[in-house]
């Protein structure tokens, strides 16, 4: 396998939260130590419930926020704040909302050329315009769209424009933060197929953030399942979907709709409350909601163990007991 474009080791992000009048500040551990590697032409999906740390991870990868601890490496170079300006062109992001991510006062051509104006001082206006028009064609839009405004486009077309803008600087890594969740189902498949086609053409490395496992099943090569800021399962897509080892992963998959009429399916309903990220319990954080919980789960936090298919669980699915 090729060398990774980007890798992370023990990546963490903590926030200090005010406790109120005369109360001490509290520590919110949004991301509690995540390892991953992104490879050219491959997609790593990060999935989990809202609040599990997916979007915080995306902000660290795109150098919007500095990690509290851990190391992020891009093309062999450590990612530090003093070199963010030179590295950001290699890592771009497509946001969830295609309606809010485009400036309504700017024409599409201006929106696409703006990254080049800021980062490529050596290019003439004619060169910038030529590249912007070529990018419109690449994402399936027509030349006349160059002079139009965002409100004149549908949601799917706006997301195509957002993808085109993210590609203007020829990035190596594209972070896709819920890129199709705001779109109709009929449009989602078209955008996903576009992303797959662009990845094959440009050999992009994708970090795909999503809570929709049916979408992840379609686009991912590898999957990380997060719970309260930590990875609880990691592996190849086929292994994770075909043989989930962590109970939380199994519960997520049981809630995913499947287009298989007549297929037998058992929905796992989790009991108990989701712990607060401000007060994560000792031991396994999933223990208060887990149907397999035992005394050792409440005492000690399980580490992510395993090579190709790893799970942070003392009593994984498929194991005796």
Image (cartoon, grey):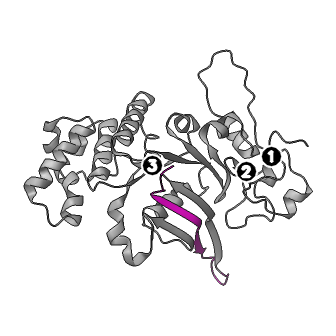
Tell me if residue 190 is in the magenta stretch.
Answer: no
Between residue 30 and residue 197, name the one nearer to us.
197
From this viewpoint, which residue is outermost toward the front? 1
- CA separation in Å, label 2 and label 3: 23 Å
Q: Is residue 12 magenta-colored?
A: yes
Q: Position of residue 288 (x, y in %)?
A: 81, 53
Disc number placed over residue 316 in the picture, else none: 1
Per the model, the C-alpha gap separating discs 2 and 1 is 7 Å
Q: Name the image quarter holding residue 87.
A: bottom left
The label on residue 311 is 2
* Circle 2 Cα neighbour tier, 10 Å, few/some/many (<14 / 14–19 / ≥20): many
Per the image, label 3 sits on a secondary structure element best described as: strand
The residue closer to the viewer here, 87 or 247, is 87
| Residue carrying label 3 | 206
At x 79%, y 52%, the residue is 313
Look at the numbered discs 1 and 3 and tell me whether their residues touch, using CB distance below 8 Å.
no
User: Which is nearer the N-term, disc 2 or disc 3?
Assistant: 3
> Who comes first in sequence, dot 1 or dot 3?
3
Of the residues under marks 2 and 1, which one precedes in the sequence? 2
Q: Position of residue 120 (x, y in %)?
A: 20, 64
At a point 80% along the width and 41% down the height, the residue shown is 317
Q: Which residues are magenta?
A: 1-24
Instruction: Give residue 61's position: percent from left, percent from top.
Output: 47, 62
């Amino acid at each position: 396998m090729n060398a990774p474009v980007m890798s992370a080791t023990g990546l963490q992000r903590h926030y200090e939260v005010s406790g109120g009048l005369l109360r001490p500040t509290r520590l919110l551990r949004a991301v509690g130590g995540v390892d991953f590697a992104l490879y050219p032409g491959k997609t790593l999906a990060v999935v989990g419930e809202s609040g599990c740390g997916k979007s915080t991870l995306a902000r660290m990868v795109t150098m919007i926020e500095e990690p509290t601890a851990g190391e992020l490496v891009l093309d062999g170079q450590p990612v530090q704040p003093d070199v963010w300006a030179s590295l950001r062109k290699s890592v771009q992001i497509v946001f969830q909302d295609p309606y809010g991510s485009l400036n309504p006062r700017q024409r599409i051509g201006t929106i696409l050329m703006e990254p080049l104006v800021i980062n490529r001082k050596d290019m003439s206006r004619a060169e910038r315009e030529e590249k912007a028009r070529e990018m419109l064609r690449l994402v399936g839009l027509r030349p006349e769209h160059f002079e139009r405004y965002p409100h004149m486009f549908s949601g799917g077309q706006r997301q195509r424009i957002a993808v085109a803008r993210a590609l203007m600087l020829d990035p190596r890594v594209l972070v896709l933060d819920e890129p199709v969740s705001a779109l109709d189902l009929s449009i989602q498949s078209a955008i996903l197929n576009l992303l797959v086609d662009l990845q094959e053409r440009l050999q992009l490395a994708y970090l795909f953030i999503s809570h929709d496992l049916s979408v992840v099943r379609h686009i991912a090569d590898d999957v990380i399942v997060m719970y309260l800021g930590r990875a609880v399962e990691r592996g190849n897509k086929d292994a994770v979907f075909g043989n989930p080892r962590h109970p939380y992963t199994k519960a997520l998959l049981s809630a995913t709709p499947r287009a298989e009429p007549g297929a037998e399916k058992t929905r796992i309903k989790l009991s108990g409350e989701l712990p607060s990220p401000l007060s994560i319990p000792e031991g396994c954080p999933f223990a208060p909601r887990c149907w397999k919980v035992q005394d050792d789960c409440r005492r000690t936090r399980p580490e992510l163990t395993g090579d190709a298919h790893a799970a942070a669980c003392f009593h994984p699915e498929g194991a005796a007991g």
